[in-house]
Image: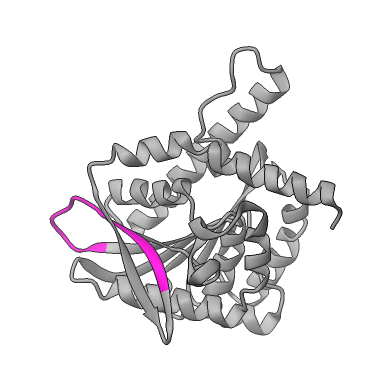
Amino acid sequence: MRKSGILLLALVFAFSLTAQDWAKARLAKSPRHGEWVLVKNGERTVHSFVVFPEVKTKATAVVVIHEIFGLTDWVQGVADQLAEQGYIAIAPDLLSGMGPGGGRTTDIPADKVREAFAKLSPEQITADLNAVSDYVTKLPAANGKLAVAGFCWGGGQTFRFATNRPNLAAGFSFYGPPPEAPEDIARIKGKVYGFYGENDARINAMIPKATEQMKAAGKVYEPVIYPGAGHGFMRAGEAPPPAGGAEQKQKDAYEANRKAREEGWKKMLAVLKAL
């Protein structure tokens, strides 16, 4: 990769992280109990952020799978918002052990994050997610039901995890690529819900084939494409609106992302409530 490309990538990650001040502030004000736990997967330790709802009955567990940026404040905020709605939410840092000295996302330089992801094997990801799922569903406050929600890279891993976790009640794949192998799709037991932005041709081009394959295999797959929204609309639609002096195109994009985020969140909660 050229030096200019590396610099651009570093700037993208730096912007993504520094632009999360709003997410960090929201999380800091949460009245709910959130804590870091160390989940064992053989010799591996998966650092995970878990948040508990303020309810009197046992709750459904939701595993939140992060984006290509790793486990950020925004992802932790998603877990907190799910707990606010009555669910035990746990967000594993799947880059645990991949940082310098065995560190996690926060220990990896911004321009090295994608390199860390490239070193993750599908087998390790699945094993980590299984370990986290076993941990959270066996908590005394959990009712044993399991759902998974993932975004971007995590959206793809959500769909893939559905092929490997028989007791998964529902998978919420936000703008992530679906699996392609018929034998993988045949293993899916739970329902899969897809959430996509209209302005995301790379991912959306995969939806027709996934729909056809899921239907042929007798599986439930409900994709929704939100008008005017782009890739990453769940994060972008939650961020503060653009400044008053911003171009109209930017304001329109924000409004489309905000609406998609609102509708996508509402749909996910409706499905969770019905589990």
Horizontal arrangement in the rendering, residue 253 relative to residue 46 (left or right): right
Residue at the farthest front position = 101
Q: Quadrant of residue 188?
A: bottom right
Horizontal arrangement in the rendering, residue 252 relative to residue 125 (left or right): right
- Picture residue at 39% right of the left edge, 73% below the top: 132
Horizontal arrangement in the rendering, residue 273 relative to residue 74 (left or right): left
Residue 20 position within the rendered picture, expressed as x and y whole percent measured from the top left: 50, 39
- Picture residue at 72% right of the left edge, 23% below the top: 249
| Depth order, front residue of 175/139 | 139
Specify the quadrant that holds the N terminus.
bottom right
54 drawn magenta: yes
The scheme the figure's colours follow is: one colour
60 versus 12 height, above or below: below
Look at the image and tell me whether residue 150 can be seen: no
Residue 272 position within the rendered picture, expressed as x and y whole percent measured from the top left: 37, 56
- Picture residue at 45% right of the left edge, 65% below the top: 170
40 versus 205 height, above or below: below
Residue 192 position within the rendered picture, expressed as x and y whole percent measured from the top left: 53, 64
**Total of numbered circles in the picture?**
0
- Picture residue at 69% right of the left edge, 81% below the top: 182
Query: In this picture, which residue range is highlighted in magenta?
Result: 46-59
| Depth order, front residue of 100/54 | 100
Residue 148 position within the rendered picture, expressed as x and y whole percent measured from the top left: 45, 64
244 versus 33 height, above or below: above
| Depth order, front residue of 208/158 | 158
143 drawn magenta: no
